[in-house]
Image (spheres, grey):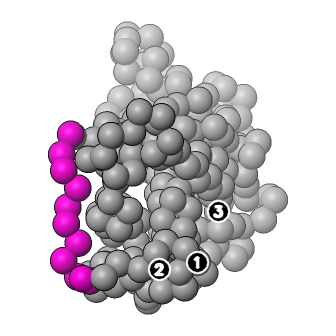
């Protein structure tokens, strides 16, 4: 379980210059007011980006962010469909220039996000933790800002993978194949012979399991640390190993 914390500098909140009259956070006009604080490049199809919400947060609430913490509670693995689950905690102090002996103005909100191949765009499917971090922070910001019927831009996924099924989940990834190829060339070793050495099938390398690919990478890393352990029958990199499909 990993945790990231960002502490903010002790500085006065930025003044809101866009509206002379700020509506109550409980009013129907509040959400529109907050969205008007955002610039055009901080919205995607009318939806606020997490970066934009972060920028206007202190302005809208007249507060100072004390801490912004990300906690990765589930890391991607073949057993969970490469799913990442993240909780973002946001602690802030309302009206920081006003004495608060009771501590009632010190508030904390959480936002959580669960990301895997089935709910994010294809281009980001290999980075579920980063996507989950951004989504979780966006949800925490929206919750604290009490935005109604608003979805952060990062929540929208228009190009979701539609052909990933149970058979493909847990298989060797393109990143692993590329890494194995780079190490194989660097060490000048035959990847197919290493697969045979490890008792892994060579008929279709794309059927190799994700965990078995990690074993291959581990073996190549051991050879890299001590190349004297590479036996002569393994020498000779052959690019065609990637064509076994």
Mark 2 → mark 3, Cα distance in angstroms: 35 Å
Q: Is residue 31 above or below residue 117?
A: below
Q: Are marks 2 and 1 in contact (CB under 8 Å)?
A: yes
Question: Which contiguous range is marked in magenta?
Answer: 10-20
Q: Main secondary structure of the magenta part?
A: loop
Q: Is residue 13 magenta?
A: yes
- In this rendering, position of residue 31 left or right of residue 161: left
Q: Is residue 219 magenta?
A: no
Mark 2 → mark 1, Cα distance in angstroms: 9 Å
Q: Quadrant of the N terminus?
A: top right
Precedes in sequence: disc 1 or disc 3: 3
Q: Residue at x 72, y 29 (%)?
A: 199
Q: Residue at x 33, y 40 (%)?
A: 99
Q: Which quadrant of the view contains residue 162?
A: bottom right
Query: Which residue lies under the disc numbered 1?
Result: 148
Precedes in sequence: disc 2 or disc 3: 2
Q: Is residue 227 visible?
A: yes
Precedes in sequence: disc 2 or disc 1: 2
Mark on residue 117?
3
């Amino acid at each position: 379980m990993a945790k990231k914390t960002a502490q903010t500098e002790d500085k006065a909140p930025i003044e809101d210059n866009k509206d002379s009259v700020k509506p109550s956070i409980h009013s129907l006009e509040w959400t529109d007011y907050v969205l008007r604080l955002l610039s055009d490049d901080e919205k995607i199809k009318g939806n606020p980006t997490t970066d934009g919400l972060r920028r206007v947060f202190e302005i809208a609430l007249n507060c100072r962010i004390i801490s912004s913490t990300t906690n990765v509670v589930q890391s991607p693995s073949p057993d969970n469909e490469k799913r990442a689950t993240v909780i973002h905690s946001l602690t802030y102090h309302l009206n920081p220039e006003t004495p608060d002996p009771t501590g009632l103005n010190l508030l904390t909100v959480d936002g959580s996000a669960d990301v895997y191949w089935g709910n994010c765009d294809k281009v980001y499917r290999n980075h579920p933790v980063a996507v989950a971090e951004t989504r979780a922070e966006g949800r925490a910001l929206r919750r604290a800002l009490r935005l109604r019927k608003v979805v952060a831009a990062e929540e929208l996924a228009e190009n979701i993978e539609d052909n990933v099924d149970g058979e493909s989940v847990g298989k060797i990834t393109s990143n692993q194949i590329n890494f194995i190829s780079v190490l194989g060339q660097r060490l000048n070793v035959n990847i197919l012979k290493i697969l045979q050495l490890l008792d892994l099938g060579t008929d279709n390398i794309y059927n190799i399991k994700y965990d078995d690919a990690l074993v291959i990478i581990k073996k190549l890393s051991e050879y890299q640390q001590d190349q004297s352990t590479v036996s002569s029958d393994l020498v000779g990199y052959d690019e065609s190993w990637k064509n076994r499909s």
